[in-house]
Amino acid sequence: MKKIISIFAAVTLAACASNIGTNTYQTSATGQINSVQEGTIINVRQVRVATENGGVGTLAGGIAGGAAGSMIGGNSAVNVIGAVGGAVLGGALGAKAQEGLSAQTGYEYIVKLDNGKAITLTQGTDQVFSVGQPVYVLDASYGERARIIPR
């Protein structure tokens, strides 16, 4: 039973990582118009992108911890105390596990737009740009993410 709960929790937490790449779009973004600006990369730095705790890790950890804690021997009162304590501890550990398992490497870019304004944008590592490279900046419209693509 403990092994099944552990496998379930690990699979659930691993599924929490968002795709932050430049080539992944939500279906709702298809057919939508985004405005485009031209610019040049003036700075690049590698960053860590961590998923905000959406509760999945806490829930999965709490369930696993509660199940494991309820198996403590003794009478019913000890089982209940073990389940509650296990759920609290499991929830806290699950939240930390979700954050660690879903963390990704990304790049923060500073782009000097052709209109003179400088902007920053962080995105995944599927396309890496270098200082001096001309790019297009696709503005975020309709709830979609902004992104930088090669020019």
Image (spheres, rainbow, N blue to C red):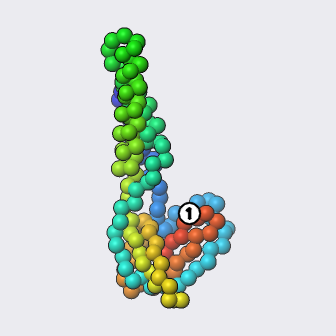
The front one of 63 and 3 is 63
Q: Which residue is mark 1?
A: 25
Query: Taking 53 as reference, is 130 above or below it?
Result: below
For numbered disc 1, what is the local secondary structure? loop
Query: What residue type is disc 1 on?
Result: Tyr
Dividing the picture into quadrants, the one containing residue 131 is: bottom left
Query: Taking 83 as reference, is 143 above or below it?
Result: below
The front one of 142 and 117 is 117
The residue located at (67%, 68%) in the rendering is: 31
Dividing the picture into quadrants, the one containing residue 40 is: bottom left
The front one of 142 and 29 is 142
Residue 53 in percent (x, y) is at 45, 48
The residue positioned farthest toward the left in the image shown: 73
Query: Taking 24 as reference, is 103 above or below it?
Result: above
The residue located at (34%, 72%) in the rendering is: 45
Dividing the picture into quadrants, the one containing residue 72 is: top left
